[in-house]
Amino acid sequence: MIVYRQKAVINLDVLYCIKSRNPFNIKKMNKFLKIFLVFLVLLTAVIVFSLQFMKPRLGGYIKQMLNNSVDARVDYDRADISLFQAFPGVSVMLGDIRVLGKEPESRDTLAIADRFSVAFDALSLFTGEFKVHSVRVDRPRIMIRKDSAGNSNWDIFPATDDTETVRDTSRLSLSLRDFRIREGFIAMYDSTKGNSVVIDGLNHEMRGRLDGKSSTLVTRNAVNKLTVSLGGLPLIQESRTSFNAKIDADLEKRKFTLEDNRLGLNDLDIVFNGTVSLLDSAVNTDLDFKADKAALKEFLSLLPAIYSNNYEKLDAEGEMALSGHVKGLYAEGQLPAFRIDVAVDNGSFGYQGVAVKAQKVGFRGSVVNPGGDADKTTISVPKLSLSIDGEPFTMSLAVRTPVSDPYIEASVNGSVDLADF
């Protein structure tokens, strides 16, 4: 009983001490909170006021900085900076951007965009790691040209001392987490080789960290119309295209590994595996691809005349195989080696409600380039056969030197009346 009473007295003393000190702590904490809140409000007001004061001068400062950095004329109609759109980061927006050539003879439009915005951590500039939370580009239109004399309109970056460039860039690393393009248009024309790529209606999204030794990049891309010509020969015409990928990136070696990444061309899905390495003046590729569970109708979706005319009413059966590879350097005036093989066996196709159908469809074809010049590309179709209403039709085709002096050898046996379809 004596021990119990002593414990009770001690507990009461502790409670009394705590109770006697609480009023003093609460008052002290309330006073601290009031001072902190007043300081926070004043600091926010100063920052907001400073930003409002800087906004009229911001547009001119950024415009001058950009024009001093490139050998082109950069202009835009609107500029804004905000603390609230990307809080706690800073958001900078430029509206109605235009990039034009400086010289009168080359003053064509290189790029325009409705809106460009970037959200970043301003304090990271002082830590050696520039942290960019997001980049948004709305409705960009980019025109890249090389004329017959080899002059490129995109060569707008002035020459710099390599040693100074390495020293400056080594002080600051870039961390980019989210990059998006909405409704973009990109056209690339090379008059020296007759090559062209037109990307119309690009919607691009990429997430991941572009810093450190390695990273995983997740990208989703959709294109309304993709057109590709090689040596003046159209390979893809206005194809609806998608590319979804999860890419393992070795950022130190600038090597990107693709595993089970999917490219969609209209209704045809192609799976890519391999690596892409970025060199100083070239891209080194080693990629294999094949169609996954392909059927004849998916292959026919690549033909513009069929895909754009009642494709939904097309009935097609038959197995198709598509495979190929791309390996080697892609650089100025140089293509990597590539090969595309296509085969169709025991196919048939026709339109709903139309009695005439093509049956016993067989096809073998390939496009091959050993690497180097686009003029080395060869197209071979040793077999195309089908039967229409019991009437056989066969064809073969070979194309060489498609750029310099196209050589075409073809044979056709039979007749086809497209009105029957």
Image (cartoon, rainbow, N blue to C red):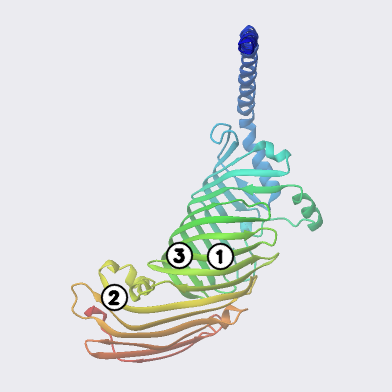
- The residue under label 3 is 226
As drawn, is 356 to the left or to the right of 297?
Answer: left
Figure quadrant of residue 256: bottom right
Residue 5 sits above or below residue 222 on the image: above
Between 121 and 373, the one nearer to me in the picture: 121
> Can you tell which of label 2 and label 1 is closer to the viewer?
1
| Amino acid tagged 1 | Leu
As helix, strand or loop, the secondary structure at mark 2 comes to strand
Instruction: Give the mark nearest the N terminus, 2 or 1.
Output: 1
Picture quarter with the N terminus:
top right
Numbered mark located on residue 258 in the image: 1
Residue 202 in percent (x, y) is at 47, 56
Image: 45 above or below 122? above
What residue would you read off at disc 2?
Answer: 316
Neighbour class for label 3 at 10 Å: few (<14), some, many (≥20)? many
Q: Residue at x 55, y 80 (%)?
A: 403
Q: Is residue 135 visible?
A: yes
Distance of label 2 from label 3 (alpha carbons): 24 Å
Q: How many marks?
A: 3
Percent x, y of residue 166: 77, 54
Q: Residue furthest front?
A: 1
When the figure is inspected, residue 220 is found, relative to residue 375, above or below; the finding is above
- Outermost residue to the right: 163
